[in-house]
Image (spheres, coloured by chain):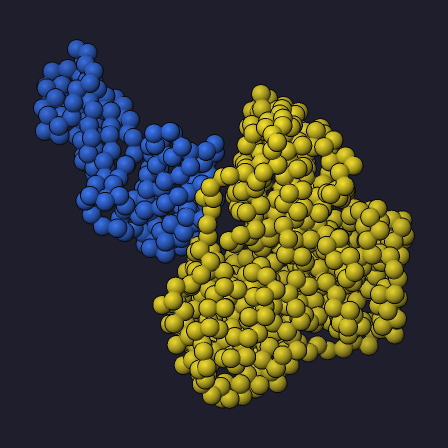
Chain colours: A blue, B yellow
Amino acid sequence: MMKIKQEQSERHVLTITVDNEAGILAKIAGLFTARGYNIDSLTVADISENHSISRITIVTHGPPAVIDQIHAQLDRLVPVHKVVDLTEMGAHVEREMALVKVAGTGDARVEALRLADVFRAKVVDTTTSSFVFELTGTPDKIDRFVSLMRELGLVEVGRTGVVGMMRGAEAA
Amino acid sequence: MSEERSGAVILVESLARQGVEFVFGYPGGAVLPIYDALFNDARIRHILVRHEAGAAHAAEGYARSTGKPGVVLVTSGPGATNAVTGIADAFMDSIPLVVITGQVPTGLIGSDAFQEADTIGITRHCTKHNYLVKDPAELAGIIDEAFRIATTGRPGPVVIDIPKDVQIASAQWNGAPPQKESRYNPQTRGSDKDIARAIELLANARAPIFYTGGGVINSGPHAADLLRQLQELTGAPVTSTLMGLGAFPADHADWLGMLGMHGTYESNMAMNQADLVVCIGARFDDRVTGRLDAFSPHSTKIHIDIDRSSINKTVTVDLPIIGDCGEVLEQLIAAWGNRKPQNLSDWKARIDGWRTRKSLAYPRDPQAIMPQLAIERLFELTKHLDPVISTEVGQHQMWAAQHFHFFGPNKWLTSGGLGTMGYGLPAAIGAQLGNPDSLVIDIAGDASIQMNIQELGTATQYRLPVKVFILNNEWMGMVRQWQELTYESRYSESYSDSLPDFVRLAEAYGWKGIRIEDESQLDAGIQAMIDHPGPVIVDCLVAKEANCFPMIPSGAAHTDMILYGDSVAGTMDDEAKALV
Ligand SMILES: Cc1ncc(C[n+]2csc(CCOP(=O)(O)OP(=O)(O)O)c2C)c(N)n1
Ligand SMILES: [Mg+2]
């Protein structure tokens, strides 16, 4: 009997500068589905003064040859100005923001607040039986915080997905 | 002088300014304003097809045979969805099309209005780019950019979806070309360093081969001339993909024939044994490479392509050169200077050895016309007329590629990437319009021809003398062949039952119909077809169960070709069956 094969994969963070036109997000996201590429996270926002340019950050994973194809396929879309593979380029910063709601009383509540302090999460809403924490950091740091909160009454998590940028003075 | 004009008028004026001669289309509610603007326009001739798929394929045939972009005009909803196959076909084969689709009025978009379809969504991944026009003031700029995108870089189809209210509303129009800065500027020249490296590889190769594709045709006739020049300088033999046939003359001593699944023994063996493969405007398609890990294992590979995403997609190459085939060929010829190639006589001798296998030979059948023979005779009797040949999809297409020979670009129109049955007749119609003095023949199969048979009426209406030459084997022959070779001859649904009488069908449409039933009638039948000044269907009854060889079964290496006379198991393991 035949089995479907799986391949080794690497995680890459790509930033894509695009014309802010109707359907652009569907075009980019659809390219990933149509060609069988993975999207781990995707963020997008308009970044120019006149709202004509957006920046999309996509975290993807795949074998090196597939990552190279993703780069080339994105590059050939007409509304795409620039694609930067931050992982390939080297030293870069990745940040994600999360809102984490935790409910509980007594020791669990005290412990949640103490851990939030350790992680430098801010309390952005509180009731006598709940907190909403705001936390920024690497995806990994957020993962760790969320998993700790799971033991202390985690109710809900919202995450933005990663945005990234090269270190140093120059634009990528 | 600037005046207010309706969107529909701006569209028609913009098309005229692009030099559009023909629009292939079909009317409907959402394009009525455009049809009104076209009414009695002396500059643009509208060709009324019988189905929107026919419009798209006709535009493809026009584009492929003339080098100019094809223009399509269809209504919203079913008009647009009917055109999608042709759009996808043009996308796979890099054919420049500008497709204008009507859309429901802006205010109704998203409301499931009558004849609403999400054309932009549906065509997103089978167009090079697409636009939804929201304001007539944007139209002139968009049309200008659409033609530039369709025709430059790697060509392809562009869809412009225009809501009905945008066709009626007005905007300023002054006739001047829109001043839009271009955001689409593909790289067309190779770097000097890469060119120098390529020349060094070519000059030192002992067993080089040119593997050329549709990119050479797309680059324009000068690219085919330059290919000949570079071949003269280097002496390397030439093979081509299905899409590239005609770029190199088939009567040249160094021509190897087509490569790949139904390619010649000599071309596939030469690819396998080469020490240098120079791929020019081809894309290492699975029909060409066969089993990837056994593909041309000893060669250094140079890949010249205008589309960076074609590089290293399936086969990793040593030297990619991103650029237009014509420009890069020119750079290579200039950089070659007065170098001398290596002595290639050993290499040529090995190739001559492979040629002696006569891989295109086939057994004759005393009872029936062999389909290969029919193509050979068609070629012999028409070659002095330098015909344009289109095909449908199936065995007849591969036999045409093997046994009809081409000496120049833009003469061979076939659906390669998508493999669309029903392509050939409308493509021949488009080609005949673009080449009114040429003999244009659709080499067809009995099943494929029925997929766009309604276009017979289009040829009748415009007095187009296209010829349809059906290799009638009463089977979906290519499907039957695969079932014979991989499913132990269980012929599931591949018999062409209830075929029409093609001669009477021709006559019903005002065409001439000719039936060829016996080898003795073959030449006379073909000659009668050529001599008739109007459109002709030839129903050529051929051997029913002939197979198309050579063949590399899917998942096999170039060296594992099946030739006539080889015995075939008729079974295949699941891994191989799972391949396309
Ligand atoms: C639109 C479409 N549907 C199905 C196929 C699959 N297909 C490939 S060849 C073929 C049979 C073609 O039969 P015919 O036109 O008689 O050509 P022959 O192989 O007999 O020469 C079929 C069904 C296709 N290529 N295109
Ligand atoms: Mg058939």
Image quadrant occupied by the C terminus of chain B? bottom right
| Residue A159 against residue A164 in the figure, above or below | above
| Residue in view at x 82 percent, y 77 percent | B366
Q: Position of residue A80 (x, y in %)?
A: 42, 42
Q: Position of residue B170 (x, y in %)?
A: 62, 25
Judge from the rendering whether residue B296 lies leftward or rightward of residue B132; answer left or right: left
Q: Which image quarter: residue B470?
A: bottom right
Please tell me which residue lies in front, B368 or B71.
B71
Q: Residue furthest front?
A: B1
Judge from the rendering whether residue B276 lies leftward or rightward of residue B147; answer left or right: left
| Residue B180 against residue B195 in the figure, above or below | above
Q: Position of residue B104 (x, y in %)?
A: 63, 26
Q: Is residue B435 visible?
A: yes
Q: Position of residue B247 (x, y in %)?
A: 60, 68
Image quadrant occupied by the N terminus of chain B? top right
Judge from the rendering whether residue B515 lies leftward or rightward of residue B373; answer left or right: right
| Residue in view at x 59 percent, y 61 percent | B220
| Residue B58 against residue B251 in the figure, above or below | above
Q: Which image quarter: residue B232?
A: bottom right
| Residue in view at x 68 percent, y 29 percent | B30
